[in-house]
């Protein structure tokens, strides 16, 4: 099934429902006898995946720490899923892009002390190694996606 903007909207809605929704989901999984044979959800639909559109709306970025945790002053890695937003609002996985991830502390005027590197694991799924947020505080994490000579930035706020 091709992911669509509608699916994203549904996911956003589900996320907005908060903890009550989460508990009822967990209950369904335990009591539904067919759940053991069901196809697992794609990893990019996991609950702790952060989602945002790039500034110009051309790309959709989803990411999570590979361990689910963002440690302070310890190396970690990211799973990143990049999508191209089509004219009709549908989005499709974006293979072959250049991805540059960087952290910035606006309150302190400095960035990261390491330069992370991204590799494509499978079409549209990228692994970013060498993440290191070396101090507590407010971070911005920038995902610069470059596709066929065109670049847009996606930005996330992170409290550490
Ligand atoms: Cu700082």
Image (cartoon, helix red, strand yellow):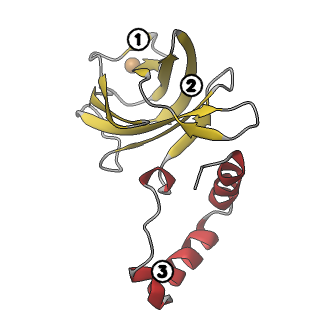
Which secondary structure lies at badge 1?
strand
Mark earlier in primary sequence (2, 3): 3
Residues under numbered marks 2 and 1 in contact, where contact means CB atoms less than 8 Å apart: no
Disc 3 under 8 Å from ligand 1? The reply is no
Quadrant of the drawing holding the N terminus: bottom right
Q: CA distance from mark 2 to mark 1?
A: 19 Å
Q: Which residue is mark 1?
A: 110
Q: Which residue is mark 3?
A: 29
The residue furthest right is: 88
- Looking at the picture, how far across and down is residue 36, in whole percent? 39, 81
Q: Give the crowd class for mark 2: few <14, some 14-19, many >=20 residues within 10 Å.
A: many
Residue at 50%, 32% in the rendered image: 94
Mark earlier in primary sequence (2, 1): 1
Q: Give the crowd class for mark 1: few <14, some 14-19, many >=20 residues within 10 Å.
A: few
Which image quarter: residue 14? bottom right
- Looking at the picture, how far across and down is residue 134, in whole percent? 29, 25
Which image quarter: residue 121? top left
Mark earlier in primary sequence (3, 1): 3
Q: Which mark is residue 154?
A: 2
Residues under numbered marks 2 and 3 in contact, where contact means CB atoms less than 8 Å apart: no
Position of residue 128 relative to residue 50, above or below, is above
């Amino acid at each position: 099934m091709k992911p669509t903007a509608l699916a994203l909207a549904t996911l956003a809605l589900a996320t907005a429902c908060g903890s009550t929704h989460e508990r009822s989901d967990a209950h369904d999984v335990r009591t539904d006898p067919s759940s053991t044979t069901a196809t697992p959800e794609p990893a990019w639909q996991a609950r702790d995946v952060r989602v945002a559109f790039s500034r110009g709306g051309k790309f959709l970025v989803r990411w999570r720490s590979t361990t689910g945790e963002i440690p302070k002053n310890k190396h970690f890695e990211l799973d990143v899923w990049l999508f191209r937003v089509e004219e009709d609002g549908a989005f499709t996985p974006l293979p072959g892009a250049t991805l540059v991830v960087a952290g910035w502390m606006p309150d302190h005027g400095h960035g990261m002390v390491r330069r992370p590197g991204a590799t494509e694991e499978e079409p549209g799924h990228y692994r970013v190694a060498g993440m290191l947020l070396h101090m507590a505080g407010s971070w911005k994490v920038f995902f610069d996606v470059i596709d066929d000579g065109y670049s847009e930035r996606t930005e996330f706020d992170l409290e550490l």
